[in-house]
Image (cartoon, rainbow, N blue to C red):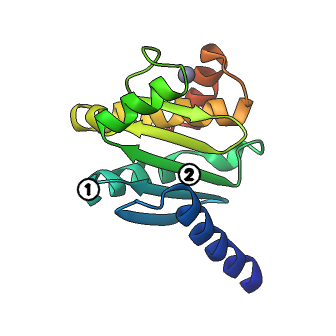
Amino acid sequence: MRLTRFLQVLMAIALALSWFFSAASISTTQASSVSVIVTTTGSTSYEQNRIIRLAKNLNLDSQPAMPEWWNIQIMSGQEFEAMLVQNGIDGLTYSAVSFLGQGKTIVNEDYLIFADDARVEQTLAHEAGHLICNCASEARANEIASAIIPK
Ligand SMILES: [Zn+2]
């Protein structure tokens, strides 16, 4: 148990260093059995804490297919747009995008500024849905989202 925790911490550090070397701040939290890592480049700790709070609320334990690690990165609107272009998916989303097989979700900070908690929760649940079904289906992601949003 202690070794597992130690390895989790090591992995969190390694992931954080390798993926987001320029991250201004990093938070790791245990959302039930799923470790949620939120990294930001320039975003406020307010948004970072909000993501953690909302992600922890989701009933991820009901979904065995959820990756053990969920890395959520908050990007500035400009970075987010550039990332979409780089991945050839610009115009497809304004709020968030997930990378299947990587347990990774990137959230647009510009979206967070205007979206209330309920909307952000819906977005996170939808993105978790993609990671859980390991598919691009919007219908399936929405189905899973309604299953994991607390009633
Ligand atoms: Zn989607």
Q: Residue at x 45, y 18 (%)?
A: 90
- Mark drawn on residue 46: 1
Front residue of 69/50: it is: 69
Vertical side of 107 occupied by 34: above or below: below
Q: Earlier in the sequence, mark 2 or mark 1?
A: 1
Locate the N terminus and report the quarter of the image it occupies: bottom right
- Mark drawn on residue 82: none
Disc 2: which residue: 71
Q: Residue 25 appears at what percent x and percent y?
A: 37, 65
User: Is 131 displayed left or right of 109 in the figure?
Assistant: right
Vertical side of 32 occupied by 124: above or below: above
Q: Secondary structure at mark 1?
A: helix
Q: Amino acid at mark 1?
A: Tyr
Vertical side of 88 occupied by 76: above or below: below
Asked which quadrant contains residue 110, the reply is top left
Q: Amino acid at mark 2?
A: Asn
Q: Residue at x 46, y 26 (%)?
A: 84
User: Is 41 displayed left or right of 31 in the figure?
Assistant: left
Mark 2 is surrounded, within 10 Å at the Cα level, by few (under 14), some (14 to 19) or many (20 or more) other residues, namely: many
Task: Tell me which image quadrant ligand 1 sits in.
Answer: top right
Q: Residue 121 appears at what percent x and percent y?
A: 42, 37
Asked which quadrant contains residue 40, the reply is bottom left
Q: Secondary structure at mark 2?
A: strand
Q: Residue at x 43, y 56 (%)?
A: 39
Front residue of 144/22: it is: 22
User: Is 86 displayed left or right of 131 in the figure?
Assistant: left
Mark 1 is surrounded, within 10 Å at the Cα level, by few (under 14), some (14 to 19) or many (20 or more) other residues, namely: few
Q: Residue 113 appears at what percent x and percent y?
A: 22, 37
Q: Residue 61 appears at what percent x and percent y?
A: 68, 50
Q: Is residue 30 visible?
A: no
Front residue of 84/52: it is: 84
